[in-house]
Image (cartoon, grey):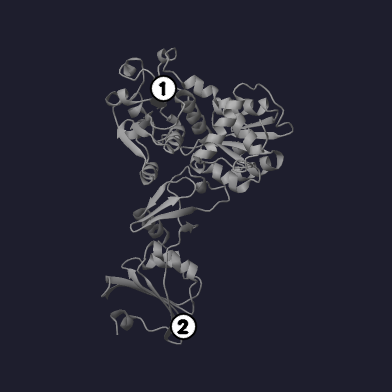
């Protein structure tokens, strides 16, 4: 049993050391080819999703079921939150019924709030524009799996860097290692100041660009993210930036031969389907790794062996 | 005798808050949760000459020795303020104010989708002080900044009686 992981809340990627992540990746490797184990038999996991989700919700559920746990899904549409019940009361109930709570919410800080309230471990599956730590773990795992290392790479992040929680968590995760980060986005979608300050305080090598063409030839990884329509307070502003960035085959012409394109998905119109069949496409692999990685997370939190 | 002392008589017992930046006396009362309804005699002098500040405000509260925790709040808008606890017309104690590392339940996060802003949740706002000069706070829930002008704006807004 790894005591650093046992019974632990997963709220932000910043709380995890490189050693702890390395241990997680070793466990995920072991789960890569395991279809079923009953090591979590008798455990009940709550999947509280107050925002739409396909990959995160399903992969947590599949991961739990592959380990023999039961899953209860509580979605925004059918939860009593819709009737005006507080998140606090909802969490109090789930904490008394279940052994672990996975939460996704449009409200920033919900996961920390949940962890403060609940006795059982809480996993943040995305809170507003803030954090998506398990996605960041999957992203690191994908890079490690491809390049056999997590450092000395030129990492491009491209798209909505202002509102995208997955990309912000990815930046915070990859900056734990010695890499150069190219933040490429339209002017209006640059990284928020509080994140930029955090990175600069840590001495992270990060540079901002507005044009992908100027840097594409230097990148080893290009992490694309969709425009987060649901986070725009002003829809007119959304319309102004809509379509302001897009990745297609042509934009990759000058890229390195072994460069990969990642995307936390879903994609909307920023990533063309023509890339799917190229060797640079890594996003479906990235999505697939969600299962072994989340199996590893659950087994570490519950303290069970592979 | 200083100019303001001619305007407001000395108090026998209580608290004198001196060297408040000019115009902030009402905000000081608001931060100290003094509304006037508590029954204490409160003297408030605004825009008096000061060697240290040019002009300043002064607040005197009779028969109340203000709690040090409440006084520390003043560091948000009046970090140079001096506090004298008066007993029997004499300065019994000079208290210093210091901004705490965490500011709780005083200010509101400016991000409407922060958990601390949700009206039906039992939660109090919580900020970490990341810079004292200029003042800069960071929400402990959503990580958004609250800068000095936003802090002052919130406190002034609250002190409009």
Residue B45 placement: quadrant? bottom left
Instruction: Identify the mark at residue B13; answer none if there is no mark.
Output: 2
Q: Relative to the observer, which residue lies in front, A292 or A235?
A: A292
Residue A45: which quarter of the image?
Answer: top right
Mark 1 neighbour density, 10 Å: few (under 14) some (14–19) many (20 or more): many
Please give the count of numbered marks on the rendered protein: 2
Q: Is mark 1 on a helix, strand or loop?
A: strand
* Of B38 and A95, the residue lying toward us: A95
Q: Nearer the viewer, residue A100 or B50?
A: A100
Residue at 70%, 28% (x, y): give it. A68
Residue that badge 1 annotates: A261
Are dots 1 and 2 on a single chain? no
- Can you give x and y, in whole percent of width and height, for residue A284 in the image? 50, 19
Query: Residue A84, image x and y in percent?
Result: 60, 41
Tag 2, which chain? B
| Marker disc for residue A88 | none
């Amino acid at each position: 049993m790894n005591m650093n992981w046992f019974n632990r809340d997963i709220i932000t990627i910043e709380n995890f050391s490189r050693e702890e992540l390395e241990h997680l990746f070793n466990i995920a490797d072991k789960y890569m080819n395991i279809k079923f184990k009953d090591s979590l038999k008798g455990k009940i996991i709550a999947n509280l999703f107050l925002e739409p989700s396909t990959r995160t919700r399903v992969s947590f559920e599949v991961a739990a079921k592959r380990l023999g746990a039961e899953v209860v899904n509580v979605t925004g549409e059918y939860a009593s939150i819709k009737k005006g019940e507080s998140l606090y009361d909802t969490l109090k109930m789930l904490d008394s019924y279940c052994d672990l709570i996975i939460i996704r919410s449009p409200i920033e800080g919900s996961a920390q709030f949940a962890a403060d309230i609940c006795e059982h471990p809480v996993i943040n599956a995305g809170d507003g524009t803030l954090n998506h730590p398990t996605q960041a773990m999957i992203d690191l795992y994908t890079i490690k799996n491809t390049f056999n290392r997590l450092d000395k790479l030129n990492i491009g992040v491209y798209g909505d860097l202002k509102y995208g929680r997955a990309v912000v968590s990815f930046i915070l995760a990859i900056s734990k290692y010695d890499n150069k980060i190219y933040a490429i986005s339209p002017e209006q979608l640059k990284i928020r100041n509080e994140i930029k300050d955090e990175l600069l305080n840590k001495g992270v090598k990060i540079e901002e660009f507005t044009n992908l063409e100027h840097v594409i030839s230097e990148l080893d990884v290009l992490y694309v993210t969709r425009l987060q329509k649901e986070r725009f307070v002003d829809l007119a502003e959304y319309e102004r930036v809509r379509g302001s960035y897009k990745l297609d085959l042509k934009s990759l012409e000058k890229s390195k031969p072994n460069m990969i394109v990642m995307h936390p998905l879903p994609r909307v119109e920023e990533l063309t389907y023509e890339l799917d069949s190229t060797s640079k496409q890594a996003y479906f692999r990235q999505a697939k790794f969600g299962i072994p990685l989340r199996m590893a997370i659950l087994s570490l939190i519950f303290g069970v062996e592979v | 005798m200083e100019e303001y002392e001619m305007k407001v008589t000395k108090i026998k017992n209580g608290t004198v808050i001196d060297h408040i930046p000019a115009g902030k006396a009402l905000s000081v009362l608001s931060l100290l949760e003094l509304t006037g309804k508590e029954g204490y005699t409160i003297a408030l002098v605004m825009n008096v000459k000061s060697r240290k500040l040019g002009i300043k405000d002064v607040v005197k509260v009779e028969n109340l020795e203000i709690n040090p925790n409440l006084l520390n709040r003043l560091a948000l808008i009046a970090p140079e303020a001096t506090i004298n606890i008066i007993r029997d017309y004499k300065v019994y104690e000079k208290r210093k104010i210091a901004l705490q590392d965490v500011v709780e339940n005083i200010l509101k996060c400016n991000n409407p989708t922060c958990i601390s802003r949700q009206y039906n949740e039992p939660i109090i706002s919580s900020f970490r002080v990341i810079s004292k000069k200029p003042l800069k706070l960071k929400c402990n829930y959503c990580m958004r900044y609250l800068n000095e002008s936003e802090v002052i704006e919130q406190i002034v807004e609250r002190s409009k009686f």
